[in-house]
Image (cartoon, rainbow, N blue to C red):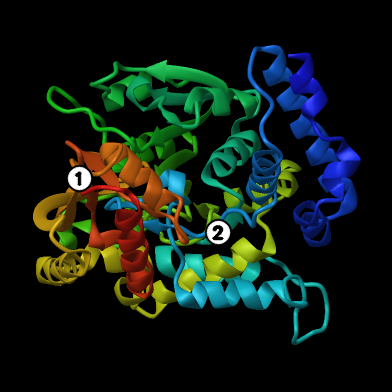
Amino acid sequence: MTESFRSLPSVNSLLSDQRIETLVESYSHGSVVELVRAHLDDVRHAITNGEQAPPLDDLITSIEHQAAKRWRTWPSSVINATGVILHTNLGRAPLSSEAIQAIESAAKGYSDLELDLESGRRGSRQGQIAALLSQLTGADAALVVNNNASALLLALAAVAHGKEVIISRGEAVEIGGGFRIPDVLRQSGAELVEIGTTNRTYARDYEAAITGNTGAILAVHTSNFRVMGFTHSPTIGELVEIGTRHGIPVLHDLGSGCLLDTAQFGLAREPVPQDSVSDGVSMALFSGDKLLGGPQAGIIVGDGDLVGKVSRHPLARAVRIDKLSMAGLAATLLHYVRDEAVEKVPIWRMVAKTGDELASTAHRWGESMGPMASVVPGLSTIGGGSLPGETLPSWLVSIDAADFDGGADALARSMRSGTPPVIGRIEEERVLLDPRTVLPEQEQDLLAAINHATGQGGGK
């Protein structure tokens, strides 16, 4: 053990190596010194536990690897070949080229974010986006914040702080990342009143729960799961009728923010904010980066007085949307205004792909990949807490990894380590690639990455 410790180079000797000097040139002297010292500490700890000191070249290679991993540009682009359209781990909705251009334009210089160009005076960052949302949903007013959980927190804090909020027990859901609707609601200062049962809640349950301290009725669309069988829940119209009769605002959290009729694509019909507004809800809340197909955002539309009250609440500043997301969202909404969302918004292009298109692409890929690849029927999913249980028929490229060293796991790992990384899915020692979620401009990179990964593996 003593010899192993003695064989370790000093920090200064490592810094004098040409390879480490290159790291210093690429990053900074202080950052590299810190990395080298930390790595030497790790090696000493390993020696204490009985391991041998690594050779100098291995030590430097490891430092280079850590530098590349720690200081790489992040998040980096990957190719999603999983068939999950709104893949939460992969950043959910990819943006349209117009939305990307809008973000770049807003980022590279100054903008009229809060300037009225006509008057030359201070303007509102919400004005332009609110007008688009009112046009698309029919609402009197709109407000955009940084995500839908913030929208719910802000809305409840503004209209129901210190009051009771009635919610069906079956809708007190977890929204992802361990965050739960009841916890968000309590942080707003409102008191949760759960009614009904997990599978059946009636209008009369809401009516019976109303007291002199009721601040709001909250309906939450269970967008990330589905309860089947013996179920019942009142319509939004029924809740609005109760709320109107008692002078209580009705809030509808739609979750995924769909503006199109999903039934036209053979999917179950997802609630849309246009219907909620038409039904008379006080405020409808939804996401920007799910079925809307834009950047992360929380959107509130509804009654002008209530939305105004929400916008003036002190929390509104804390959850304000940034200028880049605002630019991307505005460009995305314009696709809907122009009735071109299915052609321009990537997630809707993916949803709308036909079986013939997918089969043609899959066969083209299979021919490029050689005998280890075959084309098989399969299913794509929406994902991202939207349309639970709904699938779309697809055609997949199946790569047989049985003879690949390390099997399917090793092949998938090799694909992920490429440039760009390719993310597929594994089933029974086969790696499956779904063309539905691969952007057209990514095809050549995908084929090159797959052929590189399969050629390196040391299979047959």
Instruction: Report the mark closest to the observer, 2 or 1.
Output: 1
Q: Is residue 393 above or below residue 178?
A: below
Counting from the top left corner in percent of width and height, residue 151 is at 57, 44
**Callout 1 secondary element:** loop
Counting from the top left corner in percent of width and height, residue 150 is at 59, 41
Q: In 3D space, how far apart are the residues under numbered discs 2 and 1 (Cα atoms)? A: 30 Å
Mark closer to the chain start, 2 or 1: 2
Q: Is residue 275 left or right of residue 251?
A: left
Image quarter where the N terminus lies is: top right
Would residue 189 be seen by someone viewing this image from the given angle? yes
Q: Residues within 10 Å of mark 2 (few under 14, many from 20)?
A: many
For mark 2, what is the residue?
142
Q: Residue at x 25, y 44 (%)?
A: 404
Instruction: Name the residue at the front extreme.
Output: 3
Counting from the top left corner in percent of width and height, residue 65 is at 63, 46
**Callout 2 secondary element:** strand
Q: Is residue 363 above or below residue 38?
A: below
Q: Residues within 10 Å of mark 1 (few under 14, many from 20)?
A: some
Instruction: Name the residue at the bottom extreme.
Output: 118
Nearer-the-camera pick, 248 or 149: 149
Counting from the top left corner in percent of width and height, residue 129 is at 57, 68
Nearer-the-camera pick, 398 or 301: 398
Residue type for callout 1: Glu
Q: Is residue 363 above or below residue 185?
A: below
Q: Is residue 295 left or right of residue 138?
A: right
Would residue 256 be seen by someone viewing this image from the given angle? no
For mark 1, what is the residue?
390
Q: Residue at x 48, y 55 (%)?
A: 288
Nearer-the-camera pick, 279 or 390: 390
Q: Please tell me in which quadrant of the rendered image residue 390 appears.
A: top left
